[in-house]
Amino acid sequence: MSGVGKWALGIALAAAAATVAASATGRTSGAVLLGILALLAAGVAGYDVIYEWLGRRRPGR
């Protein structure tokens, strides 16, 4: 996993925790926005993992 993927994973975990906290305190709009941010960051981290894995599996690279 590259540095970008690690940052994205950290942001995703922090945003997910903030989403739970915002939802528990009744801040629905904040929870929705943070949830979307968490999903986007998790998608970037997942893409990075797959990209790195495929790069290492290809012979000749």
Image (cartoon, helix red, strand yellow):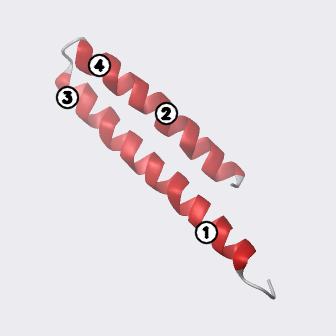
- Which badge, 1 or 4, comes first in the chain's sequence? 4
Q: Categorize mark 1 by other alpha carbons within 10 Å: few (<14), some (14-19), many (20+).
A: few
Tell me the CA gap for discs 2 and 3.
Answer: 19 Å
Q: Categorize mark 2 by other alpha carbons within 10 Å: few (<14), some (14-19), many (20+).
A: some
Q: Position of residue 30 (x, y in %)?
A: 26, 26
**Disc 1 versus disc 4: nearer the observer:** 1
- Which badge, 4 or 3, comes first in the chain's sequence? 4
State left or right for residue 12 relative to residue 52: left
- Which badge, 1 or 2, comes first in the chain's sequence? 2
Q: Secondary structure at mark 2?
A: helix
Q: On residue 29, which mark appears?
A: 3
Q: Which residue shows up at 61% across the image and 69% down it?
A: 51
Q: Are marks 1 and 4 in contact (CB under 8 Å)?
A: no
Quadrant for the N terminus in the image: bottom right
Quadrant for the C terminus in the image: bottom right
Give amino acid for label 4. Answer: Ala
**Disc 2 versus disc 3: nearer the observer:** 2
Label 4, on which residue?
22
Label 1, on which residue?
51
Give amino acid for label 2. Answer: Leu
Label 2, on which residue?
13
Q: Categorize mark 3 by other alpha carbons within 10 Å: few (<14), some (14-19), many (20+).
A: few
- Which badge, 1 or 3, comes first in the chain's sequence? 3
- Which badge, 4 or 2, comes first in the chain's sequence? 2
Q: Are marks 1 and 2 in contact (CB under 8 Å)?
A: no
Examine the rendered structure and indicate whether residue 11 appears above or below residue 27. Answer: below
Tell me the CA gap for discs 4 and 2.
Answer: 14 Å
